[in-house]
Amino acid sequence: MDFRKPLIAGNWKMFKTPAEAVETAKQIVALASATTDVDVMIAPPFTALTPVAEVVKNSHVSLGAQNLFWENEGAYTGEISPSMLKASGCDYVIIGHSERRQHFGETDENINKKIRAAIKNDLIPVVCVGETESERESEETFSVLDKQVRTGLEGFGPNDLETLVMAYEPVWAIGTGKTATTNQAQEVHQFLRALIGKSFGNVLAKSLIILYGGSVKPNNVKELMGMPDVDGALVGGASLDPETFGKIFLFQN
Ligand code: PGA
């Protein structure tokens, strides 16, 4: 297996004012200075990106956004463009989170356009895929993931996807306290890596970072990270408190 540097990403969702975000980011930067073995990324709400960018500048904590629109400018009231994110100091952008699919009607076709726009603007796309509880129960997990990946990445070549990060987030595990077992996570991560290998070649498959997301906490991160195809975590609730998030990216429990 090729070396893949672990990435621990914090998705703050719709939490924290700019002042609160700055305070949390300062503490995360301080904690992250203890390690260079792991990449750390935080994704605050749009309104906190610019002040948080100042805090993470010259640290090895990276900044990400939680969404983007695919045009760079225009009459799209309420939307934020890739070039705006880049100018605000973002290196990453989360795309296709299940909460956006569920509450805001995002489709795999929209997600495809967003991935293209992110790559074009030199933003690293963190593309989320995952099945619902009923899809898992009816044994549709792999067909759902297959469609999400194939449609989301349609029309791309391996060179376009060199920076791609995938996040497997089983919808039933997000914010519920239920984590996929390490074997469930490994099984899906292995499937995703093989699917990328089939579609885009083994070089990309081997270097692809695949995060697990869904109730990641200090007490389960180590075990998840012990699986061969789990390269990091996308952390929601537990990333809001800097000490807890620090324990996750320092792998302390
Ligand atoms: P959670 O969220 O860690 O609160 O389950 C994960 C996510 O939605 O990215």
Image (cartoon, rainbow, N blue to C red):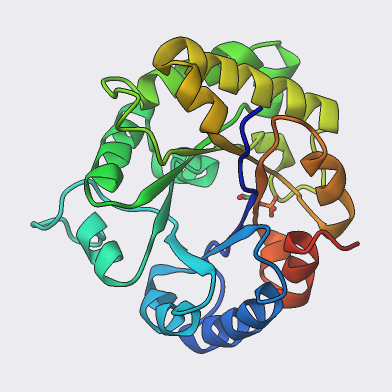
Which residue: 84% across, 59% down?
218
- Is 251 located above or below residue 129 in the figure? below
Which quarter shows the C terminus? Answer: bottom right
Q: List x then y, in percent, for residue 150.
A: 41, 17
Which residue: 25% across, 70% down?
87
Which residue: 57% across, 65% down?
12
Residues 11 and 206: in front is 206
Q: List x then y, in percent, for residue 96.
A: 44, 40
The image quarter containing residue 245 is bottom right
245 with respect to 81 (left or right): right
Residues 242 and 36: in front is 36
- Is 23 located above or below residue 157 in the figure? below
Which quarter shows the N terminus? Answer: top right
Q: List x then y, in percent, for residue 55.
A: 48, 84
- Is 247 located above or below residue 111 in the figure? below
Using the rendered image of the protein, determine whether residue 222 is visible from the camera's viewpoint: yes
Using the rendered image of the protein, determine whether residue 81 is visible from the camera's viewpoint: no
201 with respect to 50 (left or right): right
Q: List x then y, in percent, for residue 41.
A: 55, 62
